[in-house]
Structure formats: structure tokens, C-alpha cells
Amino acid sequence: MAYYRDLRDHVAALEAHQKLVRIKRPINKDTELYPLVRWQFRGLPEEKRKAFLFENVTDVTEKHYRSSVLLACHAASREVYAISLMCQPAEIADRWARAQLSPLEPEIVRSGPVQEEIHLGPNLLEHGGIEEFPVPIVTPGFDNAPYFSAANFMTKDPDTGARNIGNYRAMVKSRDRLGVCSEPPQHLRVHWERCKARGVPLPAAIVIGASPNIGLTATAKLPYGKDEVAVAGGLSGSAVQLVKCQTIDLEVPATAEIVIEGLIPTDSLEREAPFGEFSGFMGMEKISPYFNVTCICHRHNPIYNAFMGEFPPSEATKLRQLSNEAIYYKFLKHDCNIPGILGVTFLESCAGLSYTIIRMRKSHPSAAWQALNGCAALNPQYGKITIVVDDDIDPEDQDSVNWALTFRMQPERDVKIISGRVPMLDPSGFPPTEQDFAYYSHPGSAILIDATRKWDYPPVSLPRKDFMEKAKKIWEEEGLPTLTPRTPWFGYSLGFWSDQNQAEAELALRGAHYETGEKLARERIKLDANPGPGQ
Amino acid sequence: MAYYRDLRDHVAALEAHQKLVRIKRPINKDTELYPLVRWQFRGLPEEKRKAFLFENVTDVTEKHYRSSVLLACHAASREVYAISLMCQPAEIADRWARAQLSPLEPEIVRSGPVQEEIHLGPNLLEHGGIEEFPVPIVTPGFDNAPYFSAANFMTKDPDTGARNIGNYRAMVKSRDRLGVCSEPPQHLRVHWERCKARGVPLPAAIVIGASPNIGLTATAKLPYGKDEVAVAGGLSGSAVQLVKCQTIDLEVPATAEIVIEGLIPTDSLEREAPFGEFSGFMGMEKISPYFNVTCICHRHNPIYNAFMGEFPPSEATKLRQLSNEAIYYKFLKHDCNIPGILGVTFLESCAGLSYTIIRMRKSHPSAAWQALNGCAALNPQYGKITIVVDDDIDPEDQDSVNWALTFRMQPERDVKIISGRVPMLDPSGFPPTEQDFAYYSHPGSAILIDATRKWDYPPVSLPRKDFMEKAKKIWEEEGLPTLTPRTPWFGYSLGFWSDQNQAEAELALRGAHYETGEKLARERIKLDANPGPGQ
């Protein structure tokens, strides 16, 4: 089946999968829209989360917008993310590996629906400029303006021409000027530094509402220099069709809803923020580049697309979580060549980057630390807490991970604290009064934990599988509440269990445990009558 | 309202609170009974867990028992525990503080229903001895015999006469002999060592199915030398009535269902186990004391009471969790004099002893480490992972605790690993081939973590409370799925937020953010045209 041509195909698919909520009543984009969808991230389990389409959007001035607003369509949940990739949830990591290993060059086409309406030159502001679109306030009460949250910035390395797609927030500063939050070593900022060295502005196009492979690629951390439009093609299995921009030398997805073309000056910076961050705290003021709009293109009645970010879990943390899981899995298994790696999990509640769980079947006692050292090598911003667990642990179940932490780990032997990390947007790193360059004076640290078994263990203390299966049948026949079985739900051997142990367990099941009792009486140990020391 | 006179009152109360499941079909005590109740601990959320009463109990020989079996009546959940204490769940810690501070001496009475039927001397085995009662196999497939799990052993210090009640598993070895798993520094074992020094056996009475304050006290770790029957009286607010035993110089609760009197030899030991442990793994063979039965007393048609232990969470871990929470709370707040302590949580999934979370409002930056050092001082077996969090963290919600761990903690600064701990029943401590005395050659370790904010933070990145409340109303009007709000669900200040930040946020809510944009343009920062270093 062919991949979604555009966001509208994608919306239809979400609706067909019952993963879309349509809100038809008037909704204030600044005070009601984000708070409403926020509730599903603060009050529902992941499997119930959906995308939201607001069809009647207004604001404090009671303006009515032509555009509807589509929120959380990429990654409200793992299942929604899988719909974005047109695959099963379990196939996400493999899709990513394929996209990285087999990127597909984009195809340049002559025209596309994204340019159905074009505003430029003296007509740039004819429909209000940026104001034409219902850009919401994301964290009302704290944010200092509406911000674009699903602004996928396309830029090119001025030296190599390699395309980058990156998701950066964009503060609405006027009808034709936006803030751009991008810091080194983010790729847009690298392009910007290279233009600055040449004394020219950086041309950029903001793509909003493309087919979802564009947004998924924009939010993934891929190695610098990859043509990310080609990776997006690899993700969808078909070349992305691009059209040339009107005012700058860039190409953009032909079927996007909205494209804003512009130039990012390199001779000056402006403040932007406060804006809510994925750490769960407000990100405070930053001195950042800004973007002067040169042209606005859009489809007729464009859908305005936004990401749900800020407090974790959110759509943004789900996007980061799932691409990180895929990228770390590929790195550990294929690049570090650790065959026992079964999966990598980044907890969404920790913003999809700070708490990493590697599940593995150790081929050698050293394999756990090889994996931990691999994680430490890949990205100094991620994995502040990194844990290796055995294959019988469910990394999605915190109780299971805590079981490993408490009964398979000795802190003195199995924990290592490393320095030289980047406390990115992490307010524990240094006081907020020391924002600029404090990374250098206050490097962050991380904790690596081997929570695997170091030797054979006795069996898991749960009844044998056949007894649990029989009991489940009785449970259901008695009409007791529906069970959601958690790992583990039956006992199993972990290497330390003798033939005598097994024989005694079998005797007991036959009601013949007195035989064991008699043996134990025969083997009774006589004690010295003298009191021991300390008595 | 008077406290439960006996277990039967307690069962009626559980039923009235809809916390009792009655199973009327025949159930095999060895292969079906524990696996059935195990499912609620592996497949239901805590709030749905209940006590189970099995009214028709059989075994592999198709014997039918007169006794019903009551499982998980003390602490299937926090709510069930509160019913055992006849209080609200939030009052549990206070009830424990009162019991410790105001114990009530027991009252000796002349007779009680526990002695309605007495088997002793030549008639000891007239109803089969221990075999009269349906003692189940707890972990079928691995355990080597049926074990008493709710055997509350009463003993006296032979030097001081102070009574102890302790819960120790008891392996059925014959119709009149049990294994007793009790190791130093457990209090029964201390009494045993003192009798051994005198060259006499230790008299002991096993109490089964008393009013629940007895079981709650038996499973709590109270300081040595306290008369624990008086603490049980303090818990219930009324003196425990005791009757004299038939064959030994001890007194036992007058309304218990079953009492087994006996002597524990001090001149020899026997093996017992394997038996499932709270670590989630089988506890392997131990050389332990054993118990020779001298008399069996019981009520007519006694109810056989058992605890649900082994793999966490279980009833046993809930019992340990809640008494530990109460004891640590009292210790930190009252004995260490740390006024900011708001609560102590022991995760039930970590067996109610290994993962400790202290919630506090710091009165001074040192208060977090004072609390961590306090925990380290109280019990070297507990708190392998101990974390202090701020007052805005929900310790019952692992996502909330992980949020604190990832964005309020820097490992290098805020983590300390300490040695000299006891890896009690913790298979990560040393290989199972080194059971005896390995505590000395392999001391355990623990990790202490200060996950509190070290300075003022920016606000929490969620919409302001009024917007979230309004959105919740819309959510409900739209008929969206029922919400279970999680902490936090709205943004709030944490000290770092200026008047300018607030003023800009208010402007944005009035649609006047262009004013901010103009100010930022005026304050634009001109950059040096020369490229920086490294460009």
C-alpha cells in the first residue's frame, strides 16, 4: 500500500483507526486548545491517547480562522506513531534502521498543492502574514507568545548542499518575523554558523503539515550531513516529492499544507522564550536567531499542524523516545556489534531521553558494560540514567525494572558515575542565573547501572506455569475482574536448582512431603552445648 | 466502635466493605489455591485486590477439610490494611505511631474460644495433628512442602520475660514437627540463642487467625524488648485478651482460631526450604531450628489463615511496606527531628523494603542529606535505593519520581554509595553457593540520592490551573474518556520567574504579543562579523 500522499490522507487513516477526536465547538486557540489535549497526557493511559482535530478555532479577539488545527497526529502514542509510519508498533525500530541504511533521494517536481496560494513581495501580508494561521499559545499563563511547535525547518549546508530537516520552536514576533530556537550542535545552527562565516543570511523554509515521515525525520537526531529528506523517503519507502521555493534556493515537500520561506540573519540575535520545555519546566529567555518571512505558500484551507510538547509525557517526548530507541538499538547491535541486544527503551515520562533501559541476553559477563559504555559514547546529552537488564525484564513496566534494580544490582559493584555530560535543558545542572556557557563550568554527569544477574539465580518465586494457567481458567470461570498479566506471571528456572530440589518439589505435589521431613530429621545437625561467642 | 473481637468479626467487616471474595467450588489447596490469588497480584491494580475465603478445600488425596482457608485478609491492598486497623488509609502511619508511643498491656483471662478443642498428650494426633488443617503449598512446582505462612510465633525472652510476636514460615515436616525459619537478629532467634546458652529448649506458641492487630504486629520490625502484645493493644486501642497455654508457660490470644504449642530444641538444627521469597526468587536450603508440637488448640470449625507472600507485590510486601513507612516516618520526623518530613514510601514492587522515597519540604539545604543519613542509620537491611524528593512529587507515581530523578538530580553531586549493608535474601549480594556467613565477606551496599531542587527553578511547563480546570470542563462536556489526573496537572511557580516574565505572559493572553516582539527587536544584539573560533 502506498504511503500517505499528504496530511489529509494521514488524517483519514487516523480516523479509520479510531485515533482521531474531532472537536466541532468553537475553541479558543490560546486558552483552551492545548489545555484540552494536555489532559489526555495527564489523565489517560497511553493506549487511549489520540490525535485531535479542531474544526472551529477562534481566539481572544473572537477572530474565526479558516484553518483547522491538528494536534498530536504524529505520536500521541506508540500506536499513533506506528500509523504515521504505516507499520505495526513492533516494527518501528526496523523501519528506522531501513531508512538509515537505505535512504531514498527525493524527486524534484514542477508544481505541487502547497503552492495553491502564494503570498510574496508587496502582497506578503495580504492575508495577514503569519496571522493567517491559528498559531496557539502552548502553555497559557507562562508562554510569552504563540509559538509554532511543528515547524519543520529545511535548510542546506552552504558548503556541501546537504539538506537538513529539523524541528525548532518559532515564536510569533510580528506578522512577518519569528524567533528560531536552535543552539549548537543542532544542525540548523551549524548551517547558520557557516553562513555567518561567509557574512550571508541563512535561507530557510518552514514546512507545516507534510506527510508524517517529514515530521518524524525532523524530530530524530540523525548524524550530521545525512540528507534527511532522503531518510524521510527511506522511512516511507518512496521518494519525497519536492517543489522549488519562490524566494530562496531550497526545495520543499510538494504536498505540505503550509510553507513559510525566509532568511535568518547572521549579523544579529534576539531574545525569545520563556517557553515550556520537555524537562517539565519553563525554558527561560534565550538569545537566538530570528527569521524574516519572504513568502508564504499554502494549500486552499490549509490544516495547521502542531506538536504537543512540554511536560512529559507528550507527543514530542514520544517522538524523541521512539526515534532514540531505534537509533540506539541500531548503534549497539550493529555498530558496536553486541549481538545480545534485544531492545532499547527510553522512558517517555523522562522526556524520552534521560532514562534508558537496555534489554539484553548477555553472551559474556562483559557484555552489560560494553552496552553501557556504548550508550555513553553515542550522545552526551542522553541517558542520564542508563540501566542494563536481563531478557526476562519488561522495560515498559517500571515495577519490573525496579525488581531488577533491587535484586540484581549491588551499588558498589554495579554502578558507575561518569562526568563530562551535557545537562541539556536540565535545570539540575546549574542555577538558571548562569545560563550562558555554564555547560563548560558545570559539566553534567550520568549514572550507569548493570542490573543483570551476575551468576545463576534460584528460580522465580511464582507457581509453575501449568498451575498459573489452570488458576487463570478458574479465575475466569468465577467471573473475577479481567486480568492484565504482568511479566513475570509464573516461576521459571534461572540456573540454580538441583535435582534434589526438583525431586522434593515433586514429592510435595504428591502429598509425600513427610518423606522429605524424615530425611531432614535423619540429617539433623547436632550443636555444641557450649554457648557461642557473644551469648 | 470497638475493635474486632476475632477473625470472624474481621471477615464480616471485609465483606461489608466488598473486600472479600468467597470461593465455594472445591479448590485443591496445593495446586490451585495460591495460584488463583496470585493472579490478583500479577494482573489487577492494587485498588481491585481483595481477601479470598475458600469454603471448600481439598487436596491431592481428595481429602475434604473442615476448615476454610482465608488468604490475604490483612493486607491485600492499602485499603484492606486500613480495614484491618479500622481506620482510613491516610491514618495508618499515625495509628502505628500511637501504638508505639502508647502500648496497652494485655489482660490475662481464664478461658477463651481458642481452647474449645484441645488435643494433647496421647490424644495429640487424634485428629491428625497438624494434618487437621489445610496448610497449602505456596509456590507449587518449587516449594518442598506445605508451609504455614501466617504462623505468628509467640515467645518470651528467657531473661526478661518480654513477649515477642514474630511471623516466621513453618515447613510441615510431619504431623507433629515443623521447620522454623528464623535467623539472627530476628527476635525469636535471639530468644533461642539465650535458651541455648542455658541448655534448654525454647517454648513457643504458633497463633493462627487472631484479630488482625496480632498479624500486623507480628510482621512489623519493632525494637527488641518491646512487649509486642502491648503494641498490638496500642494498635487496636484495647488490651489484647490472653489465655494461658496448656503445655508451656506462655499466653496466647483468647479468640484466635488455632494455637499450636511446642518446644524448639536448641541442641540441633535441621534443613528447611526451598521456599519462595519476597525477593521474587526461591529462597534456598537453610539450616534452621525446628518445632516439636506438644499441644494443638482450636475453635470449632477453625478458619485457617494464610498470608500471600513471595513474588512482590504481595500481601507480605504490603504488610512490610506499610509498617516500614510508619516506622521510618516516626523515626525521621520525631527521633531525628527533621520537621520537613511529609511522608516515607516503600515501593511494594520492591518488596516493601528496598526502594525508599522520602517526601519533604526542605527547611535547609542540608535537610535532604540529614534524612538520607537517617535512613542509613535505621536498618542496614532496608533502603538499598533511597531517594529524597520535594513536596510536589507524588511518591506513589513512579513517573513523578522518575521526573525528579532526571531533572532535579546530578549523579556526581547528588548520589552517594554506602557500604556495610546487609543483602538480606538479596541474590545479588553473593553467589548462592556461598550462603553461610557470606554477609561477612560480601557486605552489601546502598545508593542514596538527593533528587530535590537545589535552587529556584522556572515554573512547571503546564498551562495555568484556571485554564486546565476550564479545559477539564470542556473535556467532560465532549464526553471524552474519564480522566485520572496525575501530579502535576497544572503549571506553578518554583521561585524563578520575574515580573517581566509574568507581564509578557499576560500580554500574550490578551493577543498583544507583538508588543513583546517589538521590544525584542529594539533590544536586538549585533554580532561581530568575524567568525568565532572553530568556524
Image (cartoon, coloured by chain):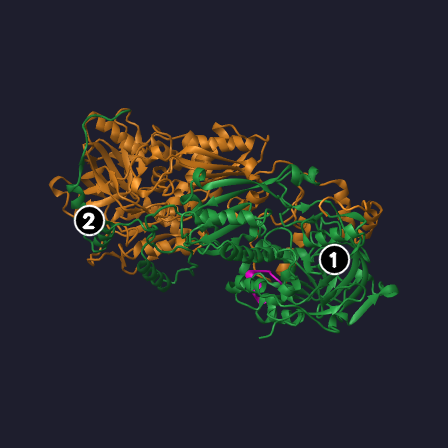
Chain colours: A green, B orange
Name the amino acid, label 1.
Answer: Pro
Residue sitting at the far bottom? A1
Marks 2 and 1, how far apart in space?
87 Å
Q: Position of residue B255 (x, y in %)?
A: 29, 41
Instruction: Write down the chain letter for disc 2.
Output: B
Left or right, B351 with reference to B473: left
Q: Is residue B193 above or below residue A50?
A: above
Residue B158 inside the magenta-drawn segment: no
Question: Which residue is at the front of the view, B238 or B170?
Answer: B170
Q: Is residue B82 visible?
A: no
Name the amino acid, label 2.
Answer: Glu
- Which secondary structure type mostly characterizes the magenta part of the structure? helix
Callout 2 environment at 10 Å: few (<14), some (14 to 19), or many (20+)? some
* Residue carrying label 2: B131
Left or right, A535 with reference to B509: left
Quarter occupied by residue B260: top left
Q: Tell me the magenta residue range.
A: A74-83
Question: Which residue is at the front of the view, A297 or B125?
Answer: A297
Q: Is residue B375 visible?
A: yes
Do dots 2 and 1 share one subunit? no
